[in-house]
Image (tube, helix red, strand yellow):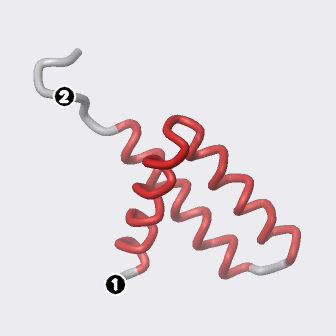
Amino acid sequence: MSHDEAAFSAARALIAQYGEDAATIAVMRAAEYAALGDVSGLAAWDAVTDAIEALQSGPGPAGAN
């Protein structure tokens, strides 16, 4: 599984669990890793945050404006 696939998989799981609050949860996790000085953990959670935003801002159902 690539990093992108892992980020999108985690993003889908967070969206399923937290709905519209998923991005907030991911940002809080990223902050925890930043506070610990864990650069790779921070980068991973930043990727999850980006994936959540991409999934939530994607095209809506067919016919929706």
Find numbered disc 1 in the image and state the secondary structure of the residue it sits on.
Answer: loop
Query: Residue 3 is drawn in which quadrant?
Result: bottom left
Does 65 sit left or right of 24 as displayed? Answer: left
Residue farthest front in this picture: 17
User: Mark 2 = which residue?
Assistant: 61
The crowd level at tag 2 (other Cα within 10 Å; few <14, some 14-19, many 20+) is: few
Quadrant for the C terminus in the image: top left
Residue topped by disc 1: 1
Q: Three-letter amino acid code at disc 1?
A: Met
Which of the pair 13/61 is nearer the observer?
13
The x and y percentages for residue 19 are 49, 39
| As drawn, 23 above or below 3 | above
Residue, x 47% and y 64% (percent of image)? 10
- Placement of 34 over or under 3, stated as above or below: above
Element marked by disc 2: loop
Q: Nearer the viewer, residue 22 or 41?
A: 22
Q: In which quarter of the image is the N terminus?
A: bottom left
Q: Residue at x 60, y 62 (%)?
A: 46
* Residue 37 at x, y percent in the picture: 84, 78
- Crowding at label 1, few (<14), some or many (≥20) Cα neighbours within 10 Å? few
14 left or right, relative to 9: right
Q: Is residue 27 shown left or right of residue 31?
A: left
The disc placed on residue 40 is none
**Residue 42's image quarter?**
bottom right
Q: 54 or 28, which is in the foreground?
A: 28
> Residue reaching furthest top?
65
In the rendering, at what x and y percent does residue 57 appear?
A: 38, 36
Structural distance between the alpha carbons of marks 1 and 2: 28 Å
Give the residue type at disc 2. Answer: Pro
Of 35 and 21, which appears nearest the observer? Answer: 21
State which tag comes first along the sequence, 1 or 2. Answer: 1
**Relative to residue 19, is residue 30 depicted above or below?**
below
